[in-house]
Image: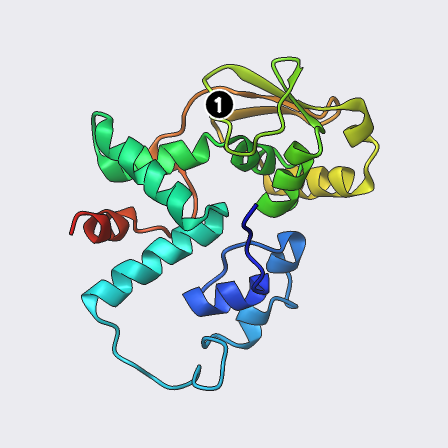
Amino acid sequence: MARYTDAKCRQCRREGGKLFLKGEKCFTDKCPVVKRTYPPGQHGQRRSRVSDYGGQLREKQKMRRIYGVLEAQFANYYGEADRRRGSTGENLVKLLECRLDTVVHRMGFGASRSEARQLVRHNAVLVNGARVNIPAYQLSAQDVIEVTSAGKEQLRVKAALEAAEQRGFPEWLEVDSKGMKGTFKAVPERRDVPGEIEEQLVIALYSK
């Protein structure tokens, strides 16, 4: 299976802001983006004018990296979002937010999406009482997500949940921290999804 091999902090610097790919490190002063706001590489500090196309492309790459989705899969999400009724941009964000790995991360069971994805792939997550090891699995309203007994003993899961509990959970999720389970109450509205994403630039890129 294809995967990203570039250092996560380099990806954040390339996109010019925090993508929160390294879990708790992103919330501390140790985050490289805080120290070096320019892109990585030999010519990173040079100022260059970004064209409209370049801005659209960067926004697509940023969105892909935030959700950890590869190119072909992201194109499929766009196609599905375009087929659905309503705003294509909003549909795209909703599809990505309904991914199992995204919800596991939002519930605090994984410090980052990559960590949440690993939990799912290692059969440490139950959906409505059944094991699901597909990170891209699309959740529906009122689905119940729970960490398995073995997963609940992992120190990293406990630490991630404790940190997430201090920051608070999104309104569309109901989380039982002690039981390490939660309910996906509803598909979030676009205005409720945190993060600086300009999905309309992505739609403009694919519409060409």
Q: Amino acid at mark 1?
A: Leu
Position of residue 38 in the picture relative to residue 159 (left or right):
left
Residue at image point 42% right, 36% down: 96
* Residue nearest the viewer, comparing 204 with 110: 204
Across and down, in percent, residue 12 comes to 50, 63
- The answer to which quarter of the image holds residue 103 is top right
Where's the N terminus, which quadrant? top right
* Residue nearest the viewer, comparing 65 with 72: 72
Residue at image point 75% right, 25% down: 178
Pointer 1: what residue?
A: 139
Q: Secondary structure at mark 1?
A: loop
Work out whether 171 lies above or below 52. above
* Residue nearest the viewer, comparing 192 with 18: 18
Please tell me how crowded label 1 is: few (under 14), some (14-19), or many (20+) other residues with Cα within 10 Å. Answer: some
Position of residue 152 in the picture relative to residue 81 (left or right):
right
- The answer to which quarter of the image holds residue 57 is bottom left
Across and down, in percent, residue 172 comes to 47, 26
Residue 85 visible in rendering: yes
